[in-house]
Image (cartoon, rainbow, N blue to C red):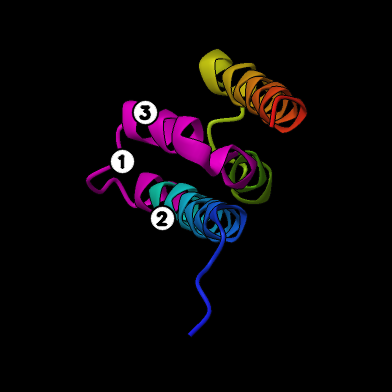
């Protein structure tokens, strides 16, 4: 059995967290329309911070969710930029 490299593990993690984040945004939008219990804004932004920023952005665009909230409209793209800069920094310093 071949062992997964750190890069493969990181890519799998990012794929999973982004898919999960995308669907959590959709679920929260569904719940908002039905006046049900909601996912907290802290949890939604937290998912973006821990690697699900692309999924958060796609979820916002697809489900038209949280697009009027400043902290999401500007925060999620800012998180994406910071994460990309961090990845470039790490890549250049390996």
Spatial CA distance of label 2 from label 3 is 13 Å
Query: Residue 7, how many percent across, how many down?
Result: 61, 53
For residue 77: magenta?
no
Give me the disc on residue 39. Answer: 1
Front in this rendered view, residue 16 or 9: 9
Q: Whole-percent x and y of residue 41?
A: 37, 28
Q: Residue at x 29, y 45 (%)?
A: 35
Mark 1 or mark 2, earlier in chain: 2
Secondary structure found at label 1: loop
Question: On the rendered structure, is 62 left or right of 71?
Answer: right
Q: Which residue is mark 3?
A: 41
Which residue is drawn at the image coordinates 65% and 20% (left, top)? 82
The reply to whether callout 1 and callout 2 are in contact (CB within 8 Å) is yes
Quadrant location, the C terminus:
top right
Disc 3 to disc 1, C-alpha distance:
7 Å
Q: Measure the alpha-carbon separation of dots 1 and 2.
A: 8 Å
Identify the magenta region: 29-56
Q: Residue at x 47, y 47 (%)?
A: 25
Relative horizontal placement of residue 58, taking residue 56 as reference (left or right): right
Residue 59, placed above or below residue 90 = below
Splitting the image into 4 quarters, where does residue 39 fall? Answer: top left
Q: Residues within 10 Å of mark 2 (few under 14, many from 20)?
A: some
Q: First in sequence: mark 2 or mark 3? A: 2
Indicate which disc residue 27 carries: 2
Picture residue at 41% right of the left edge, 48% below the top? 33
Residue 81's x, y, as percent?
71, 22
Q: Label 3 neighbourhood size at 10 Å, few (<14), some (14-19), many (20+)?
A: few
Residue 38 falls left or right of residue 45: left
């Amino acid at each position: 059995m071949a062992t997964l490299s750190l890069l493969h593990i990181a890519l799998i993690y990012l794929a999973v967290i982004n898919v999960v984040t995308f669907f959590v945004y959709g679920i929260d939008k569904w719940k908002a329309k039905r006046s049900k219990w909601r996912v907290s804004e802290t949890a939604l932004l937290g998912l973006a911070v821990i690697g699900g920023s692309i999924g958060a952005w796609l979820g916002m665009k697809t489900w038209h969710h949280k697009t009027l909230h400043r902290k999401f409209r500007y925060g999620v793209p800012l998180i994406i930029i910071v994460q990309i800069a961090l990845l470039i920094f790490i890549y250049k310093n390996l």
